[in-house]
Image (cartoon, rainbow, N blue to C red):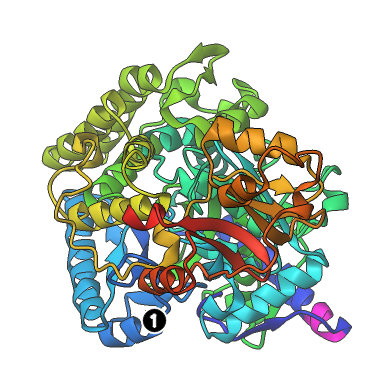
Amino acid sequence: MGHLDVKQLKSPKDKALYIHHLIKDLEALDTMLKRGLIEKEPIRIGAEQEFCVTKKDFFPNNNSIEVLEAINDDHFTTEIGKYNLEINSDPLELRGNCFSQLHLQFKELLEKALEAAKNKNSKIVLTGILPTLRLKHIKDDYMTDKARYHVLNNALKSSRREDFNIHIKGVDELNLIHDCVMLEACNTSFQTHLQINPDEFVDKYNWAQAISGPVLSSCANSPILFGRELWAETRIALFTQSIDTRRNSFIHNEKQSRVSFGADWEKGTVTDIFRDHISRFRSLLTSNEHDDSLEKLEKGEIPKLRALQLHNGTVYKWNRVCYGVGAGKPHLRIECRYIPSGPTLTDEIANMVFWVGLMLGQPKKYKKIHEQMDFKDIKNNFFKAARNGMETQFKWNNQLISPKTLIIDEFLPIAEKGLINANIDKGDIDKYLSIIRKRVNSKNGSQWMVDNYRNLQKTKTNFEALQNISAYMYKHQFKDKTVDEWELFNPDENLKIDVSRIVKHNMNTKMLLVDQKDSLELVSNIMKWKNIHHLPVINKHKELTGLLTWTDLIKLGDKELHLCVKDVMTRKLITISQEAPLKEAERIMKTNKINCLPVVRNNELLGILTSRDLLK
């Protein structure tokens, strides 16, 4: 879709014409399969590296277009968010030291991006979800100014006809109603492509589904979103809900989300997989660049199947079927979309080598996997891995087994054999698979991030902790140590964070709230029990209406505790924005001789800042 001039599919005429081309594309694909025109060898690999563009303080920057222009390299392209970019690798033949070559190419391209970003007062970070993302970064004004993203946004919203409802529950809980698809911009992936022989495509696709859960558990790297601890790989839940075109009232029907793991094992041919997608998911977009694919075939030309590829670009399977044309030859491949970016480039390549090795090494005993295992067990494995990472219990061969046991005892030997049979250099095999082995025996990126987040919260505010984590990842993302060797880091380590402190850095969000109709006697005792000197007061609409202070209670004494909070609270409040400089907050407190500032946004209470908080 990124290379097409797309528009929303609206008029009956446009819909009829697009469907006509879509059906022709399916017929053309069937014809190419029957005639043996789809390339079987050599097998090629490739990858897409998504990354975040940040400011010097490691919060998202909105200048990806400027950075892209400064890079000036066709390997790079935009993403939906103004703080994301993507690198598309060159395809490489699967042989010899191809993985080291791919590693080197990405390293050179990322160094090019680092330099360009530096010249634009920015940094780049490899991570599944940037820890410092905030709600303001998912608004429309952070969407990349390219027509295709706005067209897609409008098409998805039009199909859904109501806001997107996000609910993710982990250690913490996220409930969010949002009016656009910008939540997709929170996700950054390392998408791996493997060319597949058309004669064994469906069996290979089913095998790719079967191994997804264990592979995901080993590489999970996205446990934090908007400061909340959620899933080990929160991207899975977030992306599924952020592109869901189903209205809430239809979710309980048997209709799949556009982002899905699938409904059952695949059967038939690759064309049948595409037919199923077209049957389940209505077309959203069209283009003026469609061809008559059957006519091209009859002329001896290879069609690009533009209509089919456009539809496929709006169906986001975690293992996606792809058709492409390279050097005039058509091919089929599987795109593994669930592997996150980061936390190091070496970790990413190791994830890819592990997955490709497993795909190549599929043992004879696991051929026709759909006849041996229940698809619901495999699907459940995937979502359990997304939630729990390496703490998952998988159902494999009708037995419960840990990721560590399954990966060490069975999956790594399968991957090694597959890579050996493909004539991959022993040095590459040993180097990258040993990283997976060490990680499974130690920790993945998700475990490292949670451990450090909790440790940092002992001495830092959440806001600062997230900056420190991002800064550490930035400093180490291209070094030799992979995440299995990363430890709890010293928050005072020289991470070179350019911090202009704002109110959000120091404000307290873990606060008790009281209703203006609450008993004053109860509230006064709560303040004593909890040693609280300031309590925000809200009304039934959850709006800030006042502040009850310890000074108010001292003045009152014990005489009138039968009153309600609203009878005593301070109503004329001086408030401040979370974006205001911390020095401004300090000036306001001194000028007005107060010790507490409620932090608000549109009369919504976000936190409080006290004179004690200023000392943090």
Residue positioned 73% across, 52% down in the render = 276
Q: Position of residue 214 (x, y in %)?
A: 44, 30
Q: Is residue 427 above or below residue 371?
A: below
Q: Nearer the viewer, residue 5 or 298?
A: 5
Q: Nearer the viewer, residue 175 or 462?
A: 462
Q: Is residue 163 above or below residue 613?
A: below
Q: Position of residue 547 (x, y in %)?
A: 64, 56
How many marks on residues? 1
- Image quarter where the N terminus lies is bottom right
Q: Is residue 39 above or below residue 559?
A: below
Give residue 52's quadrant in the image.
bottom left
Residue positioned 14% across, 55% down in the render = 494
Give the residue type at disc 1: Asn
Q: Nearer the viewer, residue 407 or 363?
A: 407
Going by the image, does 120 lie left or right of 593? left
Identify the secondary structure beneath mark 1. Answer: loop
Q: Nearer the viewer, residue 525 or 429?
A: 525
Going by the image, does 107 lie left or right of 62? left
Q: Position of residue 502 (x, y in %)?
A: 39, 68
Per the image, the residue denoted by label 1 is 63
Magenta stretch, overall SS = helix
- Label 1 neighbour load within 10 Å: few <14, some 14-19, many 20+: many
Is residue 568 something one can see in this rendering? yes
Find the residue positioned furthest to the top.
399
Is residue 45 something one can see in this rendering? no
Q: Is residue 380 above or below residue 157?
A: above
Going by the image, does 425 lie left or right of 507? left
Q: Position of residue 299 (x, y in %)?
A: 57, 81
Residue positioned 27% across, 33% down in the render = 436
Residue positioned 57% across, 45% down in the render = 511
Does the stretch in magenta take in 338? Answer: no
State the extent of the magenta-drawn residues as a range. Answer: 13-17
